[in-house]
Image (cartoon, rainbow, N blue to C red):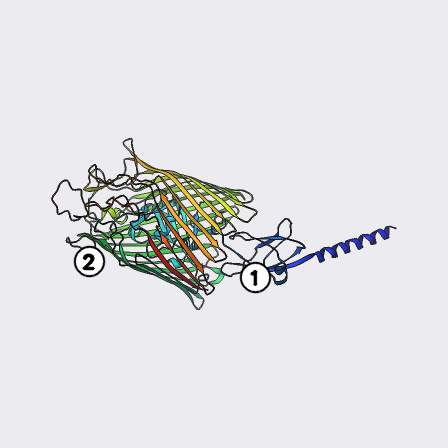
Amino acid sequence: MLQLLKSCALTFVFVSTTFILHAQNLLQGTITNSEGNSIETATVSIDGTKVATSTNNEGKFSLQVPSGKNKISIRAVGYLTNKKEITSSDLQNGLAVTLESDNRHLEEVVVSGTLKQVSKLDSPIPVEVFTAKFFRSNPTPTIFESLQNINGVRPQINCSVCNTGDIHINGLEGPYTMVMIDGLPIVSGLSTVYGLNGIPQALIERVEIVKGPASTLYGSEAVGGLINIITKSPGSAPRLNVEAFGTSWQEYNLDLGGKFNVGTAQSLIGANYFNYNNPIDNNGDNFTDVTLQNRISIFNKWNFARKDNKLFTLAGRYVYEDRWGGEMNWSRKYRGGNEIYGESIYTKRWEMMGAYDLPTTENLTFTFSVNGHDQNSVYGETKYIANQKIAFGQLTWRKEIKNHDLLTGLAYRYTYYNDNTTATVKASNTHLPGLFVQDEITLHPQHKLLLGARFDYNSIHGSILSPRVNYKWNSIDKTQVLRLGIGNGYRVANVFTEDHAALTGARDVVFEGDLKPETSWNGNINYVKKFYAESGSVFSIDASAFYTYFDNKIIPDYESDVNKIIYSNLDGHAVSKGLSLNLDWAHTSGLKAMIGATVMDVYSVENDIKEWQMLTEKAMGTWTIGYTIKPLGINVDYTGNLIGAMRLPVLGAEDTRPDKSEPWSIQNIQLSKKFNNGIEVFGGVKNFLNWTPTKGGIEIISRAHDPFERINDPNLLPFDPSYVYGPNQGIRGFLGFRYNIF
């Protein structure tokens, strides 16, 4: 009897299993990204069940699907979740799914915070990452203009005639921000104002931004933060890349990129050419609204194959720019004269940089950069001839010991500077050796502590110490991250290389005492929360609070004497504090939105008097909203910013111009479409609200009718082009194309 029961049970199990297997269907397929590359280890699961599998190294998968209606979800790190209902055709012919990149994913790789490649999630330092795709939503000829749609970051125009500018981060001016290429300090000194142009956009992989002091790792100039421009690797770049566009103002921009191999070495080469030669005076002040420019830049990067995957990379860049602005009838024959006013700037700049892993068992890396910057400028009849050379070298050693990730390094920076101003009696040679150490301690899989300190010895100003402490916590599912940080920064100022207002010749420059290095203490809190909806959409919140306290801050005084700019160390303190919020949303329907806002208070206190910092807004907002019309294959991008009121440098009580700006906004719209032959066409309208600083009849240039001040009238204000706070270029259309061959 017992034997009979066992036989019946086995028969029942066999029949049931056979029935279930017959009731299931085999689903096979391939998962790729938008560029056609296979995605390895993507997860394919059947909704409402525990049935799941992963793709192999060719992006292929197979799994048994129960009979009836089923929906599957495809997920992969760095991509938006794709949900799809299985059809009979999918079962018969196989399934091909393309995942769209989630460019704001927490697992993006960053290097700027700790000098090593880590995921954005694991970095104890909050780092914001913006890919080349983000910048394509509003194509521009320079990285300077591209940053206008990033929350807390604002390109500032410093001169209404020659349109030079710098980058503000959380209200701090350009000299407080270090700009780097591939982690190496390149843009500094003179090029803080002039060198942000001419970086070929076609070669940019991503841009990393750290808000807050980074002097512990990067030394002087990284007080307010840093911008790290990461170029493409020759191995992953397209074989040919072409991007060209023009505007209705007759601006023309061309980006070329490509790669080739020489033996085991891979090379990436790119060039940028920009031309604008169409003087326009829409505001009727007889001065060009936008500076005319002729610029060419060439970039070349080499990666050399070595044993054990050791790194060896070399890169170089050359930029030549000829720009001028001034009275509409100005030409080169008037350069440097006092007949017709013009500001003309010739810039020649070269750079070399590289990184080399030493052939040792220890993790030793030597990085270097050298650059030269020659500038020949005239502002009316005032000439400014300057030459700057910077050499930087750094040897780092990384060692992992249990839960400690140690990084220590020796650095040396040499700066040569000379110009023809009376303030520069002889050429300066500044030596800046430094030593830094950092320990990233993993207290627990959810807790990390970063301790760091840097010691620099400036040959002019002596010893400078820059410590920092950072803490990071993340939830078990890694959808929440909390970061706390406190650190010290410092900056050695050179007025003539950083402040265009000191060069215009419109005012006398006065120094009160020797300028001492500025120092700062910064504290910040950052919280990130990511939500995943069943529909496959992703929503994230990134909120920060920051507070920076300055000693010895150098603030130009425009108001004590309208004929002078007075530079001195503040006899008191200065503060930059605020809150920042970023909201990201990406839906499977093709709708994406990145919206940010920052409120801040930047001020100085001297003799118990609190003063709002000049040319600094108290609030700003940015947005990038995109939608893909899938049936037509057309992408729609709507980008813009809203900048709050700021205090402006008026020339005393007699100046009729407002001493405070009205809130203003630059908004853009773009349509783009990709074709199967690799060509992408894009076009749209920039600044479609047609906003300029002269709205309402405001004259932004004081005494524009008499720039050389020949009229002997004590009631007239001095000539002054420094009253400018936003781009003086109105509405314009644009049209262009991109072509990539992989």
Q: Position of residue 371 (x, y in %)?
A: 31, 56
Residue at the front extreme?
Answer: 631
Given the image, on which type of amino acid does mark 1 rest? Glu
Q: Is residue 207 left or right of residue 87?
A: left
- The reply to whether residue 54 is visible in this rendering is yes
Q: Is residue 199 left or right of residue 403?
A: left
- The reply to whether residue 385 is visible in this rendering is no
Q: Position of residue 256 (x, y in %)?
A: 37, 63
Residue at the top extreme?
Answer: 608
Residue at the bottom extreme?
Answer: 263
Secondary structure, mark 1, is loop
Q: Position of residue 101 (x, y in %)?
A: 49, 54
Q: Position of residue 480 (x, y in %)?
A: 51, 42
Q: How far apart are labels 2 and 1 at the CA level?
A: 61 Å
Task: Name the residue tied to disc 2.
Answer: 331
Given the image, on which type of amino acid does mark 2 rest? Ser
Q: Earlier in the sequence, mark 2 or mark 1?
A: 1
Secondary structure, mark 2, is loop
Task: Name the residue tied to disc 1.
Answer: 58
Structural crowding at the residue carrying mark 1, measured as other residues with C-alpha within 10 Å and reported as few (<14), some (14–19) or many (≥20): some
Q: Nearer the viewer, mark 2 or mark 1?
A: 2
Structural crowding at the residue carrying mark 2, measured as other residues with C-alpha within 10 Å and reported as few (<14), some (14–19) or many (≥20): some
